[in-house]
Image: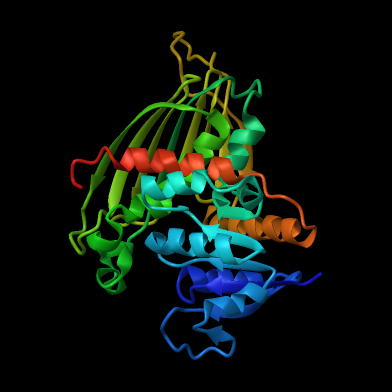
């Protein structure tokens, strides 16, 4: 079965999804929708209902438009829906989504694609392993210099009136979701957002601290105002994992001493070559492949509630900002 796909959106991340759905051997892009622009694309349309003939519809428009599209499609369309994260941008919208029917929940997929990436795989693969021990803290850092590019100043990501917390909505939510997926209920959190580049009115950097009911703590730092840097540290009771651009290293055991009997850095027990720069695209491909497998087999999607829960934590964290 070739899955026909209609995509809401046409540039930036939407263009990336258009290419990936088009490249997948089990799907093709039937329509590309924009509500008003006449696109110079052969299969473009300004009529949303044209997409209703597709097996699946992808929502990849600006974050603040997600809810209206979801609301319309859940009412008028009967196929599967692939919606970019975050699902919605307000608690009122979230509450409305929580109350949709169970049948509708089973046909909605929120694209938290880091679930299919290296960071999540590391947590899943080493959790409970003797070399690492019991995980009790995780640190994520992800940055690049978008805020210093000329295109940033005129984008919706830089506009406070459209998406004040864009860096948190777009980047930090991936890490929030990974943590929620693996460690369950959040006990408390803190949030320190900033405008560093001063080239827009929206926040371009943020630090988030999280503490879970099971005792695990985490720190997330994301920024559009720094060099490209992506790293994770997973600290356990018997070892720790460091993930950077091209390596995953596990250092263990805890009981490692120098000649005087002082603790020293444990030896490297595991060294794995990775390509972290390629991880985002690879995780997108895996996320799309998973979604298409559900559509082709006409199965139920079972990840709606977790996506909503991650979205709720995101909204609660943002509500702490004194800058709103």
Image quadrant where residue 131 sits: top right
Decide: is 56 above or below 187.
below
Image quadrant holding the N terminus, namely: bottom right
291 or 52, which is in the foreground? 52
Residue drawn at 51 percent across, 43 percent down: 98
- Look at the image and tell me whether residue 75 can be seen: yes
The one nearer the camera, 111 or 54, is 54
Q: How many labels were placed on the picture?
A: 0
Q: Position of residue 324 (x, y in %)?
A: 20, 47
* Of residues 34 and 119, the one drawn nearer to the viewer in this rendering: 34
Which residue is situated farthest in the top direction here? 261
Image height of 154 relative to 261, above or below: below
Against 31, residue 303 (above or below) is above
Q: Is residue 52 above or below residue 252?
A: below
Task: Please state the horizontal and vertical placement of residue 323, each as a whole percent of the image.
Answer: 18, 46
Question: Left or right of 79: which side holds 311?
Answer: left
Q: Residue at x 48, y 41 (%)?
A: 310
Task: Provide residue 145's location: percent of width, then percent of height.
Answer: 32, 61
Residue 47, horizontal then vertical, whole percent = 52, 81
């Amino acid at each position: 079965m070739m899955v026909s796909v209609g995509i809401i959106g046409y540039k930036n991340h939407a263009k990336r999804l258009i290419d990936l759905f088009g490249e997948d051997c089990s799907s093709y892009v039937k329509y590309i929708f924009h509500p008003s622009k006449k696109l110079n694309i052969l299969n473009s349309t300004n009529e949303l209902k044209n997409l209703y003939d597709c097996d699946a519809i992808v929502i990849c428009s600006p974050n603040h438009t997600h809810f209206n599209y979801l609301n319309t499609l859940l009412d008028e369309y009967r196929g599967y829906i692939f919606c970019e994260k975050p699902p919605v941008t307000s608690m009122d919208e979230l509450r409305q989504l929580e109350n949709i029917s169970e049948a509708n929940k089973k046909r909605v997929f929120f694209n938290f694609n880091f679930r299919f990436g290296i960071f999540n795989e590391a947590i899943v693969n080493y959790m409970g392993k003797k070399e690492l021990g019991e995980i009790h803290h995780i640190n994520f850092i992800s940055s690049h210099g978008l805020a210093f590019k000329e295109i940033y100043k005129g984008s919706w990501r830089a506009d406070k009136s459209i998406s004040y917390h864009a860096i948190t909505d777009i980047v930090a939510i991936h890490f929030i979701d990974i943590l929620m997926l693996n460690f369950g209920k959040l006990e408390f959190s803190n949030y320190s957002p900033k405008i560093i580049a001063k080239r827009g009115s929206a926040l371009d950097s943020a630090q988030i601290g999280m503490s879970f009911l099971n005792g695990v703590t985490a720190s997330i730092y994301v920024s559009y105002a720094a060099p490209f840097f992506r790293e994770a540290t997973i600290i356990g009771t018997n070892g720790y994992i460091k993930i950077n651009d091209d390596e995953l290293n596990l250092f263990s055991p805890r009981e490692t001493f120098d000649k005087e009997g002082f603790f020293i850095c444990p030896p490297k027990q595991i060294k794995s070559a990775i390509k972290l720069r390629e991880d985002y695209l690879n995780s997108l491909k895996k996320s799309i492949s998973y979604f298409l497998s559900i559509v082709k087999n006409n199965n139920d999607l079972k990840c709606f509630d977790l996506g909503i829960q991650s979205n709720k934590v995101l909204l609660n964290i943002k509500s702490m900002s004194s800058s709103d």
